[in-house]
Image: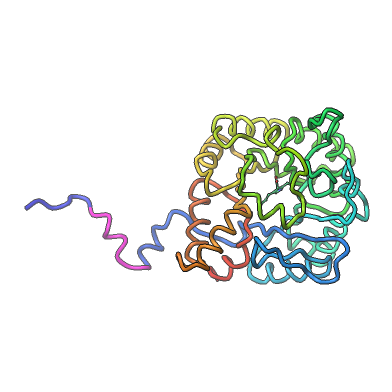
């Protein structure tokens, strides 16, 4: 009879031994809570395809952040939904725009206790629902869009954002935004770039929540082809060269190879966005009795961190922090 010469099961014997040798540890301070805030509503609104996620008023968004802070969350990202949409997304850069109002409310309430990031894009603000300006022939005008992004960045920074997060996938957006922030005296406002953002069907529930589905066409001329791994690294490298402080991969769970590549190649912190469709898939499957939701949440988040993410944006942030606490 021959015996195994190496016994890995020795260190799996008890919960304490398993905790001792664990390679990846979840910490609420590495999670970012996405928050939706909508102009012109009196009460928060539920979102059918995102159970448990609300469109907030500026008052209730502060309450939601309080709950998050009380369980150890240190960062939130804001998505504004304006009442008035037009071709150039004017409300995105308005001093009294809904995102700017909510940013000021969060900074007034929490100061430096909470990192406030703002999604920097046009799709929630345009009547056509695209992330950039549409030119006469129906294509998305890259460079005209950059000028709008610069205005939005400065107005979000002026409202108090600690971090701006450009999510429109225009070429050169990080450089343009860095330049505009520096010129306006906001050299301490950081850029978390949605660098490798794929044209994913998993954004479906978000588009209901943020009321921003494109009215014609799709986003494939600016978001990445899900088939491309080398190109994702190229996007991230370019964004670091342009001045990104944090690069993001999005979605997260189905793109762990991309997260691992980027984390291995770059020194900047890597963020990953567990998107609305990933959230909804787990919530609805658990409702049908497929598995326990809390177990699925922790396993999915652990996998994203194990792949190399240092920051995860997730609608499960508060739930996960509670389970961990
Ligand atoms: C664009 C934006 C989107 C998401 C974050 N920022 C939608 C899109 O690109 O269509 C999706 C996030 C999610 O699905 O949770 N402003």
Residue 97, above or below 193 = below
Name which residue lies at 23% across and 54% down.
7
Residue 152, above or below 74 = above
Q: Which of the pair 233/4 is nearer the observer?
A: 233
* Residue farthest to the left, as pictured: 1
Q: Which percent across, then down, holds residue 302?
A: 49, 56
Q: Which percent across, then down, holds residue 43?
A: 81, 71
Q: Which of the pair 241/97 is nearer the observer?
A: 97
Name which residue lies at 64% across and 40% down.
199
Q: Which of the pair 58/131 is nearer the observer?
A: 131
Q: 16 left or right of 277? A: left
* Residue farthest to the right, as pictured: 95
Q: Which percent across, then down, holds residue 32?
A: 66, 57
Q: Which percent across, then down, holds residue 263?
A: 55, 40
8 in magenta: yes
Read off the magenta span: 7-15
Residue 70, above or below 103 = below
92 in magenta: no
Q: Say how the picture is coloured.
A: rainbow
Q: 297 left or right of 151? A: left
Task: Tell me where residue 248 sits by quadrant.
Answer: top right
Which quarter of the rendering shows the C terminus? Answer: bottom right
């Amino acid at each position: 009879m021959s015996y195994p010469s190496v016994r890995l099961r020795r260190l799996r014997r008890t919960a304490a031994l398993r905790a001792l040798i664990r390679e990846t540890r979840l910490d609420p301070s590495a999670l970012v809570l996405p928050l939706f805030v909508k102009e012109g509503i009196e009460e928060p609104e539920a979102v059918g395809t995102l159970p448990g996620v609300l469109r907030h008023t500026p008052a209730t968004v502060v309450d939601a952040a309080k709950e998050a802070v009380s369980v150890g969350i240190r960062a939130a990202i804001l998505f504004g939904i304006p009442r008035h949409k037009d071709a150039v997304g004017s409300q995105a850069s308005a001093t009294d725009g809904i995102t700017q109002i909510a940013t000021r409310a969060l900074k007034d309430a929490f100061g430096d206790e909470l990192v406030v990031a703002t999604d920097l894009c046009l799709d929630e603000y345009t009547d056509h629902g695209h992330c950039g300006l549409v030119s006469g022939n129906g294509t998305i005008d890259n460079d005209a869009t950059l000028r709008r992004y610069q205005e939005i960045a400065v107005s979000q920074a002026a409202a108090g954002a600690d971090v701006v997060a450009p999510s429109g996938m225009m070429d050169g957006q990080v450089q343009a935004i860095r330049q505009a922030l520096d010129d306006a005296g906001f050299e301490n406002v950081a850029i978390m770039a949605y660098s490798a953002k794929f044209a994913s069907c998993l954004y479906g529930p978000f588009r209901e929540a943020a009321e921003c589905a494109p009215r014609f066409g799709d986003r494939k001329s600016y978001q990445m082809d899900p088939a491309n791994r080398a190109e994702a690294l190229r996007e991230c490298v370019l964004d670091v060269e342009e001045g990104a402080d944090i690069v993001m991969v999005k979605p997260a769970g189905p793109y762990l190879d991309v997260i691992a590549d980027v984390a291995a190649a770059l020194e900047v912190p890597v963020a990953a966005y567990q998107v609305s469709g990933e959230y909804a898939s787990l919530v609805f499957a658990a409702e049908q009795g497929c598995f326990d939701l809390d177990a699925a949440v922790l396993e999915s988040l652990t996998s994203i961190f194990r792949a190399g993410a240092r920051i995860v944006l997730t609608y499960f942030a508060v739930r996960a922090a509670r389970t961990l606490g």
